[in-house]
Image (spheres, grey):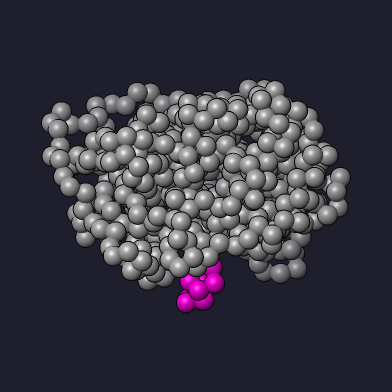
Amino acid sequence: MSLPSITPPPLTTSFTAKPTQPPIRQIPGSHGWPILGPLSDRLDYFWFQKPESFFRTRMEKYKSTVFRTNIPPTFPFFTSVNPNVIALLDCKAFSHLLDMDLVDKKDVLVGDFVPSVEFTGNIRVGVYRDVSDPQHSKSKQFSMQILKESSSIWVPELVSNLDIFLDQIEATLSTTSSASYMFPLQQFLFKFLFKVLAKADTSLDPKIAESGYSMLNKWLALQLLPTISIGKVQPLEELFLHSFSYPFSLVKGDYNNLYNFIQQHGKEVVKCGKEFGLSEDEAIHNLLFILGFNSYGGFSIFLPRLINTIASDSTGLQEKLREEAREKAGSTLGFDSLKNLELINSVVYETLRMNPPVPLQFGRARKDFQLTSNDSLFNIKKGELLCGYQKLVMRDPAVFDEPESFKPDRFTKEKGAELLNYLYWSNGPQSGSPSVANKQCAGKDIVTFTSALIVAHLLRRYDSIKGDGSSITLLTKAK
């Protein structure tokens, strides 16, 4: 079964650039004094303002969607990290990050900070490599082939594992008024993703079956803690989580367990990596990153937001989605069902627009060039690090009507299809196609397809769902 594609029509003139050239402007903002400037910005980012307000206040202060600032991590124990960035906060400016002729993507997944290669077996996996690196082509082809080969089992495995997860939530609700679903959701994701992507059944190893998802959580956390806020009491979070890198030794045993499991039970997929020029070691580490960081990590962030959108609704949206899921998806859910689920697809897209799972994208200027924002031109120098905060980029009023409002039908009909050109959550537009020539997420389409299928399955199974981004309080089975 081949995966469907959604390709919007060409942009209409209402979204094209104005014929007059905007004025050239000096980039506003400042990186401040060494140490003090980055430290001040770090405290604003994590403590006093938080990321969204951090970017909003500076955008308003400088009356510009392009400005200089600093991005954590910074002082005291990140002496090799340069926190200086140029923020890009409108769609037109952000689009330069997707032009591989203009930006270099080597080691900029989380800015200038690069977690130790020990976390990936002393191998720099594909996501950290620029498109000019031959290893990028090998790992990207490998990841796209994995997804292609998984398509025949994706939907049945998704549905069967999703039902196990929902049975568990129902059992909890039978004895209590609220069921926290984060860990059960991650257990479902872990088992499902390992089966479809690695062709490995986690039940073959009791330790992996019981604790594999926890192993991934720790592995992810130790790499990203210096760059994210976890909502703990300040200043403890600043002192103990954002001031230094954590050593791989803390999760070495867990990672080796996952590596050995893939080596033993994912041989078919690992062999596929060899076909693209990857050694067994390179294939396993790349596969673990695809599974753990890209897939499991991304879904763990996004699905609770999507469930919250559905379960906390008080506007009648759930009823409309339920009607569409039951009347237009066909007798059996599958990829072919998606072409008829216009509103469900739109809700998935709108949730991604409002809360992309990866909020920041980076690129280092490959050469001197002129960057165009919605209203100005800016001179960018070779080597400068560009930072796009997607949560604000995709609320650009020049592109999106009522950008701060959640509009379930925003991506429906012809205009909605055009707006997919500005849905940048996947390091590329939703209308784009991942290839070895770009850095767009190989699983871009499968993420949206899977999310839409989950929504459809939920609303075919239940007449009513109540809850939020962390717990379910009511599940009324379909009559």
Is 429 left or right of 252, judged from the image as shown? left
Near-viewer residue (108 or 232): 108
Q: Name the residue rendered at 55%, 31% in the picture.
A: 136
Query: Percent position (x, y) of residue 269?
Result: 74, 31
Query: Percent position (x, y) of residue 376?
Result: 18, 41
Which residue range is magenta in the image? 230-241
* Quadrant holding the N terminus: top right
Q: Name the residue rendered at 75%, 28% in the picture.
A: 271
Query: Percent position (x, y) of residue 342?
Result: 49, 34
Is 22 left or right of 206, judged from the image as shown? left
Query: Percent position (x, y) of residue 102?
Result: 35, 33
| Number of residue marks | 0
- Residue 41 located within the stretch drawn in magenta: no
- Residue 235 located within the stretch drawn in magenta: yes
| Residue 406 vertical position relative to residue 153 in the rendered view, above or below | below
Whether residue 197 is visible to the viewer of this picture, yes or no, is no
Q: Name the residue rendered at 21%, 53% in the picture.
A: 28
Name the quadrant containing residue 127. Answer: top right
Near-viewer residue (119 or 452): 119
Whether residue 172 is visible to the viewer of this picture, yes or no, is yes
Q: Name the residue rendered at 32%, 50% in the picture.
A: 87
Near-viewer residue (378 or 432): 378
